[in-house]
Image (spheres, rainbow, N blue to C red):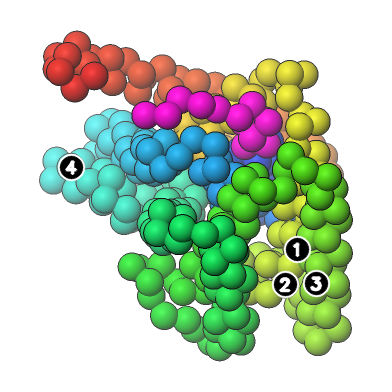
């Protein structure tokens, strides 16, 4: 397996992983906050993960990303297994429910709403990675790959206007036609643009394209263009255009955020544990922390300011415990089967 890493990408992954906590606090753990705040938090969201994954593919190759998908589903399944072992569920469910998460499916679990909602990313990531790897591996000339990447959003433009798309290996086609070009764009930027004089121009171009597109959406859709959560599942044009803000920031600040942010780099290196950890932590907060904070704070600003640091602390603690436990499980397996090393 290729062990190369890009510390700049690790920092950005760390930022996005922790920002998901802010999103879930805004949507699920604090009451009374305005809609503009929720939409603001979505300016840095899952699209940044797909873009960063494309950039990562240009550095580490396919083996590490495929392993990341497997570790992601395994980590979610491990968390579900821990929960099911200590609740009153029948034994058949203690086996069946974790197996669903391991095999890229899911099931509603009482008290873990954010955990279930976060899992949608896993099968979507798998499908996008399968198609992206097929294109990157089979399209020998880079200009053809870029051409395919530019063509893919065209079906999305038409599908986004319909009431529904169609399933692609169980994932909505509109999500595939959005996240797959985004992955390929990240691959292209890291491979051909980042280390040239075009880096800043590419960032400004993405920002302008996103701003103009979002402005046109606002012109034709009115206030609906700013309701980003309503345009996220599945991805629709206002959400797509708004996501270009985070993409442009990643391109613009690449190579500027390394060395001084060791904590973020650590989180980015363990982003799988932290993505799963934030889902588990914010779910627990919903029932055991948020109600007391909402009673103590008189307005949404106070509640939000209190809950975000609490969510970050719980996420960091749980993610590190989760990382330790899974490392111990892997170590036990390797000791039992040295030939599997």
Query: N-terminal of the two: label 3 or label 4?
Result: 4
Classify 10 Å Cα crowding around label 1: few (below 14), some (14-19), many (20 and above): many
The reply to whether dot 2 and dot 1 touch (C-beta < 8 Å) is: yes
Residue position marked by numbered label 1 in the rendering: 242
- The disc, 3 or 1, on the residue closer to the chain's N-terminal end is 3
Cα separation between marks 3 and 4: 46 Å
**Residue bounds of the magenta highlight:** 1-14
Residue 248: x and y in percent read: 78, 52
Q: Is mark 2 on a helix, strand or loop?
A: helix
The residue to which callout 3 is attached is 214
Q: In the image, is 218 to the left or to the right of 78? A: right
**Residue at the spot x=14%, y=41% of the render?**
91
| Disc 1 secondary structure class | helix
Q: Sequence order check: which comes first, mark 4 or mark 1?
A: 4
Residue pictured at 49% horizontal, 67% vertical: 176
Quadrant containing the N terminus in the rendered view? top left
Q: Are marks 3 and 1 in contact (CB under 8 Å)?
A: yes
* Cα separation between marks 4 and 2: 41 Å
> How many other residues sit within 10 Å of disc 2, few (<14), some (14-19) or many (≥20)?
many
Reading the chain from its start, which is encountered first: label 3 or label 2? 3
Label pair 3/2, CB-CB below 8 angstroms: yes
Distance of label 2 from label 1 (alpha carbons): 6 Å
Residue 166 located within the stretch drawn in magenta: no
CB within 8 Å, label 4 to label 2: no
Residue 95 marker: 4
Q: Is residue 116 visible?
A: no
Residue 316 shows in the view:
yes
The C terminus: image quadrant: top left
- In the rendered structure, the answer to whether residue 101 lies left or right of residue 23 reads left
Q: How far apart are marks 4 and 1 (CA)?
A: 41 Å
Q: Which of marks 4 and 2 is in front?
A: 2
Residue visible at 37% across and 43% down in the picture: 66
């Amino acid at each position: 397996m290729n062990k190369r890493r890009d510390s700049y990408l690790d920092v950005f992954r760390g930022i996005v992983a922790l920002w998901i906590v802010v999103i879930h606090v805004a949507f699920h753990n604090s009451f009374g906050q305005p809609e503009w705040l929720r939409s603001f938090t979505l300016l840095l969201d899952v699209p940044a993960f797909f873009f960063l994954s494309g950039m990562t593919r240009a550095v580490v190759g396919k083996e590490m990303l495929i392993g990341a998908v497997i570790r992601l589903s395994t980590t979610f399944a491990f968390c579900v297994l821990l929960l099911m072992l200590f609740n009153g569920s029948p034994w058949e469910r203690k086996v069946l429910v974790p197996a669903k998460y391991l095999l890229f499916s899911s099931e509603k679990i009482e008290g873990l709403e954010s955990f279930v909602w976060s899992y949608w990313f896993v099968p979507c990531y798998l499908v996008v990675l399968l198609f992206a790897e097929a294109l990157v591996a089979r399209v020998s000339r880079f200009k053809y790959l870029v051409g395919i990447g530019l063509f893919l959003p065209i079906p999305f433009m038409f599908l986004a206007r319909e009431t529904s798309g169609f399933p692609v290996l169980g994932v909505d086609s509109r999500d595939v036609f959005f996240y797959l070009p985004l992955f390929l764009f990240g691959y292209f930027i890291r491979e051909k643009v980042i280390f040239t004089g075009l880096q800043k121009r590419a960032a400004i171009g993405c920002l302008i394209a996103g701003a103009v597109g979002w402005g046109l959406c606002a012109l034709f859709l009115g206030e609906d263009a700013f309701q980003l959560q309503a345009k996220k599942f599945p991805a629709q044009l206002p959400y797509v255009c708004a996501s270009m803000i985070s993409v442009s920031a990643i391109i613009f600040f690449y190579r500027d955020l390394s060395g001084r942010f060791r904590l973020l780099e650590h989180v980015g290196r363990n982003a799988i544990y932290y993505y799963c950890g934030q889902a588990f932590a914010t779910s627990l907060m919903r029932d055991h922390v948020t109600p007391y904070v909402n009673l103590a704070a008189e307005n949404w600003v106070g509640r939000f300011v209190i809950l975000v640091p609490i969510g970050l602390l719980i996420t960091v603690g749980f993610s590190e415990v989760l990382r330790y436990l899974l490392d111990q499980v892997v170590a036990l397996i390797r000791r039992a089967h040295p030939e599997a090393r």
